[in-house]
Image (tube, rainbow, N blue to C red):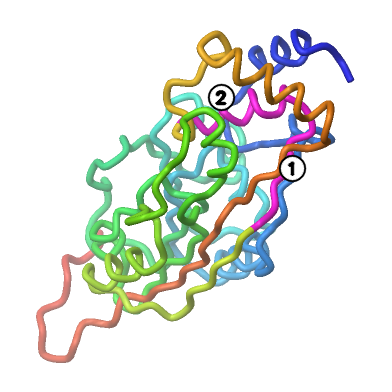
């Protein structure tokens, strides 16, 4: 194995824009959930008329779909990711809209028959329901509670397992409060392996919310201990959690005024 300094220097200078994790090939692995989100998403996109993908990153998951709807829009809040998405998806006539996290979605009520997202930061349930057409679907894979805690706790110390964000029960309640009906809900716990300390530096630079104040300089002692541990005992093991959620917005009940028409 290369020296500690070589590994962290390489990872500290790697491009971490977008959601392409190919830099980690041969250095880290993550077990995939059993449902196969990309394949399920591709099927739904092939049958949609006007779809929206939230927090699209660099557009990688949408780019995998063989067929896209006649009209397809994606949103992203981080400008480098948005620019990457434009380069990747522009040739397929996908509109990329920059939307700051937590901001109102810049679309009329009832615009989309399908809204999707892979690992959204914080699903805006009220906005999702607002921009969906009656009978429309929200289909997504979310990061679940306590994901990668084994690694995060190396840097931040023990974390509470009580009242966790992103718990499926809480997300179901929030979706229902926004007027959506849950039609499918699945969870999975997936094994992650990090085979060198550079892989850990890279993932913490990419997933900045894991250790918000992370830098190599600030956490050098922690990284050196992890490096020694991996060299002595093999890959560092953690576990991600994932939730597959599908919800529909019921059609407007008979006798009620229609929602704002879409131009």
169 magenta-colored:
no
Question: Secondary structure beneath disc 1?
Answer: strand
Looking at this view, is 4 or 61 the one in front?
4
Q: Is residue 194 above or below residue 162?
A: above
Q: Judge from the rendering whether residue 13 lies leftward or rightward of residue 204; answer left or right.
A: right
Q: Residues within 10 Å of mark 2 (few under 14, many from 20)?
A: many
Q: Which residue is mark 1?
A: 193
196 magenta-colored:
yes
Query: Please, which residue is most extreme toward the bottom here?
Result: 254
The structure residue drawn at horizontal position 74% and vertical position 29%, both measured from the top left corner, is: 23
The location of residue 147, given as percent across then percent down, is: 53, 49
The location of residue 185, given as percent across then percent down, is: 48, 74
Quarter of the image that includes the N terminus: top right
Question: Secondary structure beneath disc 2?
Answer: helix
Q: Judge from the rendering whether residue 137 lies leftward or rightward of residue 257; answer left or right.
A: right
The structure residue drawn at horizontal position 22% and vertical position 61%, both measured from the top left corner, is: 109
Instruction: Give the Cα separation between the discs numbered 1 and 2.
Output: 17 Å
The total of numbered circles placed on residues is 2
* CB within 8 Å, label 1 to label 2: no
Quarter-of-image position of residue 169: bottom left
Q: Judge from the rendering whether residue 184 lies leftward or rightward of residue 8; answer left or right.
A: left
Quarter-of-image position of residue 28: top right
- Residue range in magenta is 190-208
Q: Residues within 10 Å of mark 1 (few under 14, many from 20)?
A: some
Residue 82 seen in render: no
Q: Is residue 20 above or below residue 64?
A: above
The structure residue drawn at horizontal position 50% and vertical position 53%, both measured from the top left corner, is: 143
Q: Is residue 5 above or below residue 134?
A: above
Q: Which residue is mark 2?
A: 205
Pick whichever of labels 1 and 2 is earlier in the sequence.
1
């Amino acid at each position: 194995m290369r020296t500690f300094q070589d590994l962290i220097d390489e990872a500290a200078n790697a491009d971490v824009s977008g959601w392409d994790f190919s830099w980690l090939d041969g250095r880290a692995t993550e077990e995939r959930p059993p449902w196969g989100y990309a394949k399920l998403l591709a099927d739904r996109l092939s049958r949609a008329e006007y779809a929206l993908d939230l927090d699209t990153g660099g557009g990688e998951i949408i780019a995998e779909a063989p067929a896209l709807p006649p009209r397809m829009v994606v949103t992203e809040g981080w400008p480098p990711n948005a620019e990457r998405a434009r380069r990747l998806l522009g040739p397929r006539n996908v509109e990329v809209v920059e939307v700051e996290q937590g901001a109102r979605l810049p679309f009329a009520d009832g615009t989309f028959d399908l809204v999707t997202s892979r690992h959204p930061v914080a699903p805006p349930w009220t906005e999702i329901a607002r921009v969906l057409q009656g009978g429309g679907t929200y289909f997504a894979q979310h990061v679940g509670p306590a994901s990668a805690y084994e690694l995060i706790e190396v840097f931040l110390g023990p974390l509470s397992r009580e009242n966790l964000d992103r718990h499926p029960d809480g997300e179901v309640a929030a979706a229902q409060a926004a007027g959506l009906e849950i039609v499918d809900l699945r969870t999975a716990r997936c094994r992650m392996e990090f085979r060198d300390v550079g892989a850990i530096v890279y993932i913490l630079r990419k997933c900045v919310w894991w250790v918000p104040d992370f830098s190599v300089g600030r956490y050098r002692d922690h990284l050196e201990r992890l490096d020694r541990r991996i060299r002595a005992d093999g890959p560092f093991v953690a576990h991600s959690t994932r939730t597959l959620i599908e919800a529909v917005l019921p059609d407007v009940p008979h006798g009620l005024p229609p929602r704002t028409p879409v131009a």
